Image (spheres, grey):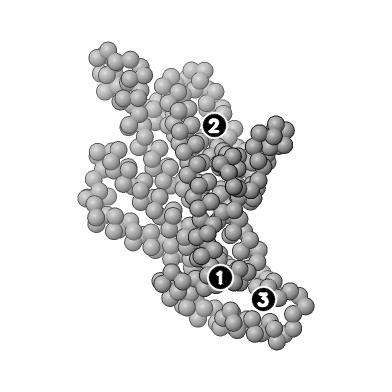
Amino acid sequence: MIRVIGKRLLIGVLVMWGAASLIFLIVRVAPGDPTTILLGPDASREQVAELTAKLGLDRPVFTQYLGYLADVARLRFGDSYRFDRPAMSEVFERLPATVDLMLASSLIAVALGLALGLLAGGRPGGAVDRLVTAGTIALQSFPTFWVGIMLILIFALAFRLLPSAGAGSPAHLILPAVTLALPFTAIVARLTRTSVAETMREPYIQTARSKGLTEQQVLLGHALRNSLIPVVTIVGLHMAGLMGGAVVVENVFAWPGLGTLVVEAVSNRDYAVVQAATFLIAGIVMLFNLVADLLYSQLDPRIKLDGAA
């Protein structure tokens, strides 16, 4: 197991290096000059030249890249142009809000998706199955930002039940978490439904029924565990999608997390913050994928982590 975990971590490090390198190039080839953004259009040439030298932007790009990699190896990303403080400190300050949003949305999506998938897959072709299938297709069809706006219009403006933006109380988390969770709920529900429907046709399910077990006992005691195998895999892989969706959702609801920070940093050409946030997000995605691999091996006895897998 240790050897395989080491391989997964090595692959994760390579992915993180690739992501950090890609964002390094993207933010530097994008149009716009950070010195002009910081100093304003009325700054003199002397002021621009002084700030450019201070930020190290007068050096060749490859030299900047080598210095950047050396700093990344020491988890140093420099200071934020905008906040005048270490970039990673700013990222860590915003991280808890994003973690809260992701955890809340994941719990909603997995709990609701599993429940809907079990109901639909337990009786394939029935009325509940058709209703769940139609509902999940609709959820995956709606853009996330549109869903967020509709929830604001209904629950914040029309009924005034929940706050529309900001943070500060558990109530502020409900609308953004539900918005982020709905597309993921549809994926979990459809995958669970398919997996349960296939599992219910297996011979050992018929054996369990012949022993006098109720349909609920068969479904929860025998079919559920095997049906969870593909679900665990997709949950781990979909964490990257949740991070991407969090960027949109956080900006719709003015949620003070990494998503809004990255958008602000890109708008202001704050290289250090963009690079620090990207590095951290890549690490979070890698960690979730590693956990998914470990859970997958525990759920499926046919997979052994101490082998070549």
Q: Nearer the viewer, mark 1 or mark 3?
A: 1
Q: Of tags 3 and 2, which is closer to the observer? A: 3
Q: Image quadrant of residue 170?
A: top right
Label 1 Cα neighbours within 10 Å, binned few <14 / some 14-19 / many ≥20: few
Residue 111 % position (x, y): 45, 33
Q: CA distance from mark 2 to mark 1?
A: 44 Å
| Residue at the spot of label 1 | 85
Residue 136 badge: 2
Q: CA distance from mark 1 to mark 3?
A: 17 Å
The residue that disc 3 covers is 35
Task: Report the side of 272 relative to 10 (left or right).
Answer: right
Going by the numbered disc 1, the residue's amino acid type is: Arg
For the residue marked with disc 3, what is the amino acid?
Thr
Label 3: which secondary element:
helix
Choose between 100 and 42: the one closer to the eye.
100
The residue furthest right is 42
